[in-house]
Amino acid sequence: MKQDLNLSALRTEWFGNVRRDLLAGLVVALALIPEAIAFSIIAGVDPKVGLYASFCIAVVTAFFGGRPGMISAATGAMALLMVSLVKDHGLQYLLAATVLTGVIQILAGLFKLGDLMRFVSRSVVIGFVNALAILIFMAQLPEFKGQGWPMYAMVAAGLTIIYVLPRFTRAVPSPLVCIVVLTAFAMVSGLPFRTVGDMGELPSNLPAFFLPDVPFNWETLRIILPYSIPLAVVGLLESLMTSTIVDDLTDTPSAKNRECSGQGLANIVAGCFGGMAGCAMIGQSVINVKSGGRGRFSTFVAGVALLILIVVLGKWVKQIPMAALVAVMIMVSIGTFNWASFRNFAVYPASSSIVMVATVLVVVFTHNLALGVGVGVLLSALFFAHKVSRFVAVESALSPKGEERTYTVRGQLFFVTAGRFGDAFDFREVVEKVRIDVGPAHFWDLSAINALDRVVLKFRREGTAVEITGMNAASQTLVTRLAKHDKPGALDNLGGH
Amino acid sequence: MPIILACTDGSSYAPSVYDHSAWAARRLGARVHVLHLLDAHRESPALMDYTGTIGLNAQANLMQELVETEQALGRAAQSKGRIVLTAARQRLETAGLTDIVADQKHGSLLEGIAEFEGEADLVVLGKRGEAAAVDPHHLGGNLERVIRSCHHPVLVTPLTFEPIERMLIAFDGGPSARKAIEFAVASPLLKGIDCHLLTTGRVDDDARWFLGEAAEKLRVAGIDATTHAHGGDPESVIAESVETIGAQLLVMGAYGHSRIRQFIVGSTTTTMVRTCPVPVLLFR
């Protein structure tokens, strides 16, 4: 039965939308060429490394990814992480790091780490996306250095074509027109523009299988592991975020853990065919969905068409002026940035905005998206702990005859609230009996139990009988395991932790 | 009370689905549950834009655009669905039924069947669906998956309803064919219909013995079955027999073989349902 459903689902995922998937895949392939080249240049490798990577990753994720219709290829987020590895150790170590990244991602998929995405809050995601856009934009700035006004003019003309042309026709990709027009202009005018050909070698044939040429020893592992771990983390983060975006846009579900393994396999294949590590691309996936791509076929077409175009058109691709690529990348960064976040400063709670801004700042200053997300997640957790801690209250009532006081404790008791809980009791009042009703409360950790201990034992030392009522089962287990007040000899070792 | 699940999509096969449901409901004293599914087909989008650009707030804008177009399509589909269900109710009421439930659900036919099939005793489906006019030789894309997913008998209807006076039970001795015999014995649905029992494929002593056993079972239940044993290619023998006997209903077990075998040699069930001009009652 399950098998039947899988087979039919597979057919829908691949061939449910063939014609539009084909067209969307072609649009994406055309948009991928400048990006793959630009990201190779960011990473400091030949354009062919990014192009081979984009081909391998797109094709492998088409088969093994968890999100049909999502585009994965060589990306800026990943390229930024490998700059110093390439500079210090060269391409072969990058390829080895790419394979190791894939292995780590497959393990993440097997251990279902994709589920951890739920700890990454909405604010962190927006921060990540904005930081990514800023980094892509900043990576374009060195291209202007020492180029003079013709470069600025070319980029401005390129951006004009990209944004104005769609007002007249939606049938041709305007970034492609921008590239064609600027290339033609550069060739005809004969001005000395820097071109893609100046940036390194372009592919002239299909990628070939070879293992990275590095010694297989601990020394190599020591070099590549510090790169592979952040690469794996960032790759999975961006892929899972993108798959959520595509889920929302297309109103269809995806398999998150399968996506992790799919990305891993794609990176292993890329590394073995001379490509750099990559992941899902937010911008390209949006372009794909916008162009009507929904199925796995669109991703597959994007990869294959990219390679065919680049091998066939290599001679022309070499002539593309860098200005055209820069214009396209500026469009990508503008499209990726979440512009609503400026407006939302006024609307969102301050804590959300702080998390978002902190994520952006950490990323922009360290150029490490993984670190930024880590800080964002940590801050979100602290803010959450703080918010929850505000919902702790201790109320008390004296019995009519004045010999018994009942304290009612509400809320979540854990390390943040333990101190406030302890201070809420009046130890100077003389009563025969104190009843502590913890029905509406929950004890979460050692600090909370410790605070309860201290309250109970302190009352006892004053000669007051203490009764605790209404404790829920989960809290009770913790008390049985950790508390001192309910064990014999409790009065002797009341510590002041 | 037994329940008949009548799946409709408002296509040219829908009236026949209602007629067959009405026939079965009268025989079983059942309630008819008409189900219309709003399958949004998210795998093929309503929006296309080949500009390849992503402008300011690309994602948010695209989301809004998609929601707006799909909302319009969804509303249109809903009102079409209401018309389909009203037509279904009218036709069933004209056929003299009173106990009718009609509703719409979001999702694919397969999901709808999975949700409601549990409480139904018989599922009625058209041979082909909305795409019938486009691709007349291909079996309704959903049909095979639905039949495979059903635990109850499925009645697959042709374009028109003919009064059913004679039926042919294609009997291969397999578990699903035995189920068909048990159903014929126990259920009032097939009572009083002139019954012919056919075995085909490789007709050996075993096959004859099984055939005799099945006929005996039917006879005990008061159904006199004429038995036929014709060796040969099951598809063509069954099709020919339906014609020569003049049966208005074919009863058979469905998908006795594995998916792999079916992939290689094809499925008798799918061929029969596709080519047979009479309704087919299938058992899994």
Image (cartoon, rainbow, N blue to C red):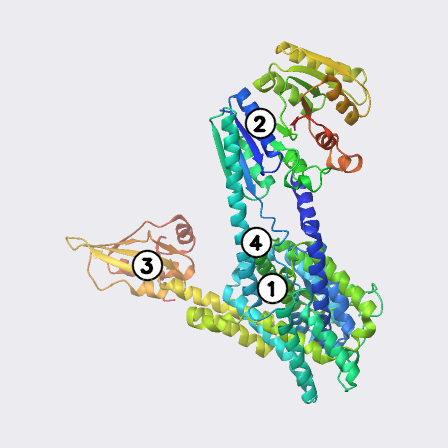
Q: Give the chain of mark 2.
A: B
Q: Amino acid at mark 1?
A: Leu
* Residue A106 visible in this rendered orientation of the protein: yes
Residue sitting nearer the eye, A322 or A154: A154
Whether pointer 1 and pointer 3 mark residues with C-beta atoms closer than 8 Å, the reply is no
Q: To which chain does the residue with label 4 belong?
A: A
Q: Residue at x 76, y 72 (%)?
A: A93
Q: Which residue is mark 4?
A: A251
Marks 3 and 2 share the same chain: no
Tell me the tag on residue A237: 1
Quarter of the picture containing the C terminus of chain B is top right
Quadrant of residue B189 within the rendered picture? top right
Kindly indicate whether the residue at mark 4 contacts the one at mark 3 (C-beta within 8 angstroms): no
Looking at marks 3 and 4 on the same chain, the residue that comes earlier in the sequence is marked by: 4
Q: Is residue A67 above or below residue B279?
A: below
Q: Position of residue A83 (x, y in %)?
A: 69, 76
Mark 2 — residue? Answer: B19
Q: Rounded to the nearest whole Å, what is the CA distance between mark 4 and mark 1?
A: 21 Å
- The answer as to whether the residues below labels 4 and 2 share one chain is no
Residue A38 visible somewhere in the drawing: no
For label 2, the SS is helix
SS for callout 4:
loop
Are labels 1 and 3 on one chain? Answer: yes
Three-letter residue code for mark 3: Leu
Q: Which residue is mark 3?
A: A491
